[in-house]
């Protein structure tokens, strides 16, 4: 048998034992150990048997790398790098931190399921049925199942742009939750909710959570923008802030007029104790900026203590209200001014005009009708 080429990259490490000095030979730094050589000096030449073992280990490593380069795992690594020496793709880098956290968990589940599957399989239209089957197998957690499909679709879209797959088999798969579940625009914090929330805040001694909800209702800001809003971004007549969330791939500026309700909230927030190095408008119980997860949990704790939930008037289904749903409350305030059209409110909130119309019908028009009826009854008495 012909001797293989001299293997390069072998790593030789000395170790002192009671019996004397020994040398461990590895196929590469961090690779498998292939030999142990006793002796006081580092070996200058490796035996043919050791060289064969090194060459075989390196060949197996190369074959494994070549095989992985053609799997879904390789596409995942290209999209979201785990190598500190190579950055993730621009597409992954542009995602918000909260999106990376949610999508990262879904990506881990996708890798566990299909990481070793060749990319050629994902270029076969028949794979769509497998994706639907995977979605259905996770139907006990419909939102998680839908997020999994969403992330797989984004991954394969990235793959088609890079020429790694020919089609996107996750495209066009409907949501398990359905449109009504995904669309939360009609879920708002009512005046009764706010009253109950404030009472629960007093019972739990969690004033910072009330501060956050009040500011959300008075400004319509998203959670990340609420948590990161600084006093420097509040001008004499308006708040001007670069939004944390991207819209159509770009970050836009949020501009909010300083209306009387917002003025009252800001005046209260200025009195809060805060750390010397903290410039955010909202602070936690320690006077520090809110961590997003802690802010969400704090509001949720008070909400649950108060027993606040949205009940669908048609189905009776109960759905949890989130801090983000305070945007809907702010939207109703815009509608109640009577000077903004549904389209104008939609553009301000980043929603569709249909969503705004539905909120107006449920929370504004119906209220106006009830008030008008009451006024007629009182006038007739």
Image (cartoon, helix red, strand yellow):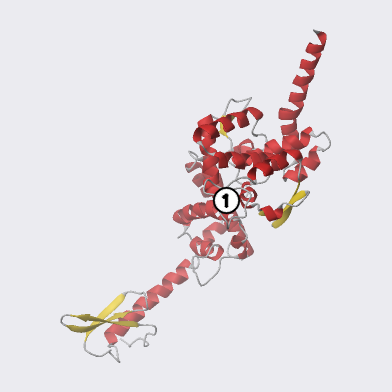
Picture residue at 74% right of the left edge, 24% below the top: 367
- The residue closer to the viewer here, 18 or 230, is 230
Task: Locate residue 329, reporting x and y percent.
Answer: 68, 36
Picture residue at 28% right of the left edge, 83% below the top: 50
Task: Locate residue 123, reporting x and y percent.
Answer: 57, 58
As displayed, is residue 319 above or below residue 249? above
Specify whether 195 is left or right of 83: right
Q: Residues within 10 Å of mark 1 (few under 14, many from 20)?
A: some
**Circle 1 sits in a helix, a strand or a loop, which is it?**
loop
- The residue closer to the viewer here, 188 or 303, is 303
As displayed, is residue 315 above or below residue 176? above
Number of dots carrying numbers: 1
Examine the image and state in which quarter residue 20 appears: bottom left
Q: Furthest-top residue in view?
A: 381
Q: Furthest-left residue in view?
A: 19
Q: For mark 1, what is the residue?
A: 274
Task: Locate residue 114, reporting x and y percent.
Answer: 47, 56
As displayed, is residue 202 above or below residue 72? above
Task: Locate residue 280, reporting x and y percent.
Answer: 62, 52
Query: In which quadrant of the rendered image does the N terminus lie?
Result: bottom left
Query: In which quadrant of the rendered image does the C terminus lie?
Result: top right
As displayed, is residue 34 above or below residue 244? below
Q: Furthest-right residue in view?
A: 339
- The reply to whether residue 11 is in sight is yes
Specify whether 284 is left or right of 254: left
- The residue closer to the viewer here, 254 or 147, is 254
Examine the image and state in which quarter residue 380 appears: top right
- The reply to whether residue 129 is in sight is no
């Amino acid at each position: 048998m012909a001797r293989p080429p001299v293997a390069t990259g072998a790593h030789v490490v000395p170790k002192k034992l009671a019996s004397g000095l020994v040398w461990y030979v590895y196929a590469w730094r961090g690779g498998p150990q292939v030999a142990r050589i006793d002796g006081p000096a580092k070996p200058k030449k490796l035996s043919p048997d050791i060289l064969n073992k090194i060459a075989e280990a390196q060949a197996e490593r190369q074959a494994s790398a070549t095989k992985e380069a053609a799997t879904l795992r390789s596409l995942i690594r290209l999209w979201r790098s785990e190598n500190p020496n190579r950055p993730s793709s621009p597409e992954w880098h542009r995602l918000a931190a909260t999106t990376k956290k949610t999508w990262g968990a879904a990506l881990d589940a996708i890798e566990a399921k299909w990481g070793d599957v060749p990319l050629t399989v994902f270029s076969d239209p028949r794979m769509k049925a497998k994706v639907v089957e995977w979605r259905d197998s996770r139907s006990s957690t419909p939102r998680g199942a839908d997020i999994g499909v969403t992330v797989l679709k984004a991954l394969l879209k990235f793959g088609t742009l890079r020429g790694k797959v020919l089609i996107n088999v996750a495209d066009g798969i409907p949501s398990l939750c359905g449109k009504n579940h995904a669309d939360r625009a009609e879920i708002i914090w009512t005046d009764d909710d706010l009253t109950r929330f404030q009472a629960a805040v007093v019972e739990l001694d969690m004033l910072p959570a009330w501060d956050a909800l009040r500011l959300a209702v008075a400004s319509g800001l998203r959670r990340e923008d609420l948590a990161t809003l600084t006093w420097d971004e509040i001008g004499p007549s308006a708040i001007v802030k670069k939004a944390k969330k991207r819209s159509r791939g770009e970050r836009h500026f949020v501009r909010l007029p300083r209306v009387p309700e917002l003025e009252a909230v800001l005046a209260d927030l200025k009195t809060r104790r805060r750390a010397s190095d903290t410039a955010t408008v909202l602070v936690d119980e320690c006077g520090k900026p809110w961590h997003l997860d802690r802010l969400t949990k704090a509001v949720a704790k008070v909400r649950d203590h108060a027993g606040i939930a949205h009940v669908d008037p048609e189905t009776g289904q109960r759905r949890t209200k989130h801090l983000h749903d305070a945007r809907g409350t702010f939207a109703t305030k815009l509608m109640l001014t009577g000077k903004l059209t549904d389209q104008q409110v939609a553009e301000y909130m980043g929603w569709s005009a249909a969503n705004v119309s539905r909120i107006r019908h449920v929370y504004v028009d119906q209220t106006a009708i009830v008030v008008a009826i009451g006024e007629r009854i009182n006038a007739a008495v």
